[in-house]
Amino acid sequence: MQKLLTDIASTMQQENERGKVADYIPQLAHVDPQRFGIAVALPDGQLFTAGDASEPFSIQSISKVFSLTLALGKRGDGLWSYVGREPSGDPFNSIVQLEHESGKPRNPFINAGAIAVVDAIMMRHEPKEVLAELLSFVRFVANDESICFDHEVAASELAHKHRNASLAHFMKAFGRLEHDVDKVLGTYFHQCALAMSCTQLAHAGLFLVSDGVNKATGTRVVSAQRARRINSLMMMCGHYDGSGEFAYRVGLPGKSGVGGGILAVAPGRASIAVWSPGLDGTGNSLLGTRALEMLAQETGWSVFGH
Ligand code: GLU
């Protein structure tokens, strides 16, 4: 495994075609597209890494896996009145489906859906309290107390909030958001601004590898059924309108973020995190996807065969 990751990292480091770093959040535009990291965490506690695996980056939409998990814990199946479970086939920040579907977002991983999930988690609490709970949950699943929000990224996204603010106001107009739009958005932007390294993310994904239990720490996070369902949502919706392509090429549940990270889960085998800041046309990490494709090919890991 170590040799494979070292090979993948050196192949990716030599690539000239690296995609385009997200610049609609100005703070993300400063990230060096040459960075590349990968980490593989196994249920027995072993960890393999290569490249910039210990460097924290903005996990952005990967955080939606953790907020979804928290929301299901608080609301159970009641969450599905806020948000659906279908792939959208539209870009991550699209507004068009919302009008046709009465303001109910297709799934928890597109922006509108994640904003609805934040609303579901808030339960009349202030953003500060909600964020403290989210942070302690992420620290718990990753077994790492050093994880923090990057407040500069959150402020940068808030200053350029117009697209997400439109989605939130549109949902509010349909009576879909219970809380004040600004409070929901402020919470959402901080959630997306969690900074984590590939190593921390790979550890945080371990509960999805072993039916809800982080075997490395011996703690149950969710039931087996819930873990499987979160994986199914990652498979179908985790890469926006690139989800079919990711399933075809990598064959594992995964969630990407515009910071260039991807968390992928090989059930029963490993939690994998990869980071390369340049994105493809659908907003997913170009080389991150390629690296996962190489890893899946070499290991044979796939949910579609054995
Ligand atoms: N914070 C980002 C946004 O709302 C998340 C998008 C992503 O990572 O795909 O635009």
Image (cartoon, rainbow, N blue to C red):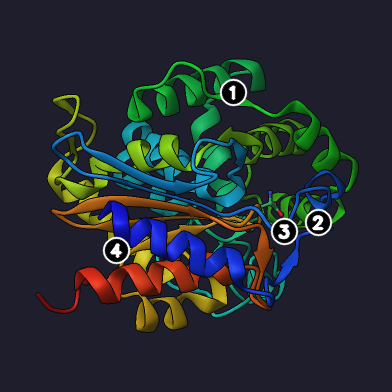
Sequence-wise, which precedes: disc 4 or disc 3?
Answer: 3
Beta carbon at label 1 within 8 Å of ligand 1: no
Q: Amino acid at mark 4?
A: Ser
**Which marked residue is nearer to the observer: mark 3 or mark 1?**
3
- Disc 2 + disc 1, Cβ < 8 Å: no
Beta carbon at label 3 within 8 Å of ligand 1: no
Q: Is any atom of residue 115 visible in this view?
A: yes
Q: Disc 4 and disc 2: Cα gap in Å? A: 29 Å
Sequence-wise, which precedes: disc 3 or disc 1?
Answer: 3
- The residue positioned 56% from the left and 69% from the top of the image is 287
Q: Disc 4 and disc 3: Cα gap in Å? A: 30 Å
Q: Amino acid at mark 3?
A: Pro
Observer-nearest of 3 and 116: 3
Mark number for residue 148?
1
User: What is the crowding at mark 2: few (fewer than 14 residues within 10 Å), some, or many (at least 20)?
Assistant: some
Image location of residue 230, percent across then percent down: 31, 53
- Secondary structure of the residue carrying tag 3 is loop
Q: Which residue is mark 3?
A: 33
- Disc 3 + disc 2, Cβ < 8 Å: no
Q: Which residue is mark 4?
A: 232
Observer-nearest of 192 and 215: 215
**Which marked residue is nearer to the observer: mark 4 or mark 2?**
4
Mark number for residue 230?
none
Mark number for residue 166?
2
- Disc 4 + disc 1, Cβ < 8 Å: no
- The residue positioned 57% from the left and 54% from the top of the image is 36
Image location of residue 188, percent across then percent down: 65, 39
**Which marked residue is nearer to the observer: mark 4 or mark 3?**
3
Q: Disc 2 and disc 1: Cα gap in Å? A: 28 Å
- Secondary structure of the residue carrying tag 4 is helix
